[in-house]
Image (spheres, grey):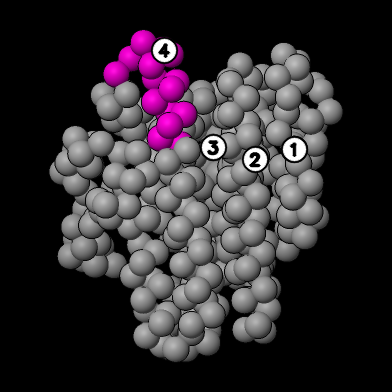
Amino acid sequence: MNQVQAQIGAALAATDPLDKVRRVQALVAPSATELTHWEIVTVPRSPGRPTRLRLVAPRELPRRRALGTPKGRFALLHALAHIEFNAINLALDAAYAFAGMPPGFYSDWLQVAREEALHFSLLSQRLEDLGGCYGDLPAHDGLWEAARATADDAMARMALVPRVLEARGLDVTPALRQRLQTVGDAQSAAILERIEADERGHVAIGSRWFTYLARRAGVDPEATFFTLLDRHYRGRILGPLAREARLQAGFSVRELDLLEARAVRPEEQRSDG
């Protein structure tokens, strides 16, 4: 394993959030020569996380309080910080573990890691403003479960993580941002506005490399996306979908129509509790 790949692996393994952010900011994209010595990493990867962070099953998470209360806003921002911390690790893992890709693949995912690190830092500072820090509340491990399910398959990873899990943020973030504005938390709303703008680009990167891998394998991208969704995704598609944002992020009209046909409607989500 060459030095650049080892540095990415060290950033992935870092447990202290500040250390992880510093390591991510110091990473540089590998050269074409370095990529000739890139190793496929097949061993199970466990990302570094704060030791104080308690991971529980989703059903064990406390219900979030109303955003009109400080505790309610803290719980929401903590959940978002956890998503962004996982997103750092997911971007690093894509660059670290998958060999044989063009140089742009690695530079893209390291750029995503840097932007996710910025998002996490902004949310961490806001948690401190509200009197706490990341790790004060429990969280679940659903995002990394998706990484484990696609640990040895770059095409499945591009399908499942950017185009399903991260794309969900395109659907829900505008409404969350508006709710924060409504309760007078303009600072948190501004952070979500920045995250929303960047995440559209992240999903587009996932779409681009998914399409590249599908075409390299000689398979139809649209059909293969749904095959991989059925094979690997155990959750539900939740509606409504942000069609315009998803179109800009590389989804086709046909993909969106098929996803909407599968989506659980808002009233059905409420009835599930």
Looking at the rendered structure, the secondary structure element under dot 1 is loop
Looking at the rendered structure, the secondary structure element under dot 3 is helix
The residue depicted at 19 percent of the width and 46 percent of the height is 260
User: Which residue bears the numbered disc 2?
Assistant: 110
The residue depicted at 41 percent of the width and 87 percent of the height is 183
Give the magenta range.
Answer: 206-220
Residues at marks 1 and 2, CA–CA distance in whole angstroms: 8 Å
User: Which residue bears the numbered disc 4?
Assistant: 217
User: Which residue bears the numbered disc 1?
Assistant: 28
User: Which residue bears the numbered disc 3?
Assistant: 147
Q: Classify 10 Å Cα crowding around label 2: few (below 14), some (14-19), many (20 and above).
A: many
The residue depicted at 80 percent of the width and 36 percent of the height is 7
Residue 66 appears in the picture as rendered: no
Pointer 1 with pointer 4, Cβ within 8 A:
no
Q: Classify 10 Å Cα crowding around label 4: few (below 14), some (14-19), many (20 and above).
A: few
- What amino acid is at disc 1? Val
